[in-house]
Image: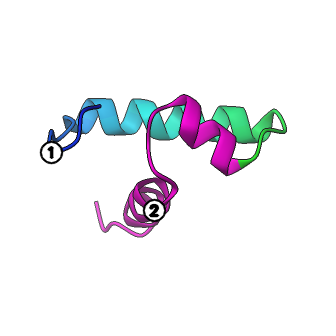
Amino acid sequence: MKRGQRPSAEQVVLMLRQIEVQTAQGKSIAVACKEADVSEQSFVTSAYARRFSTR
């Protein structure tokens, strides 16, 4: 995703799942994030928000 553009909620969930699958297959978070074109900080923040949301 280009800098400054916000992904939709569906795109965020898809990226998180893609990274989670890759890490389950043995890839490091850094490599999985790089392949998904997401910064590690964004992944950690999104994953934390998703895990602890009250929805």
34 relative position to 42: left or right: right
Q: Residue furthest front?
A: 3
CA distance for labels 1 and 2: 15 Å
Residue 14: x %, y % from top left: 42, 30
Residue at x 75%, y 46% (from the top left corner): 28
- Above or below 38: residue 39: below
> In front of the other: label 1 or label 2?
1
Residue 45: x %, y % from top left: 41, 64
28 relative position to 14: left or right: right
Q: Quadrant of residue 4?
A: top left
- The residue segment tinted magenta is 29-55
Q: Residues within 10 Å of mark 2 (few under 14, many from 20)?
A: few
Residue at x 70%, y 33% (from the top left corner): 22
The reply to whether the magenta stretch includes residue 52 is yes
Q: Which labelled disc corresponds to residue 4? A: 1
Which quarter of the rendering shows the C terminus?
Answer: bottom left
List the residue tagged with mark 2: 41
Mark 2 lies on a secondary structure that is helix
Residue at x 34%, y 66% (from the top left corner): 53
Per the picture, the main secondary structure of the magenta-coloured stretch is: helix
**Residue closest to the eye, 55 or 12:** 12
The type of residue carrying mark 2 is Gln
Mark 1 lies on a secondary structure that is loop
The type of residue carrying mark 1 is Gly
Which quarter of the rendering shows the N terminus?
Answer: top left
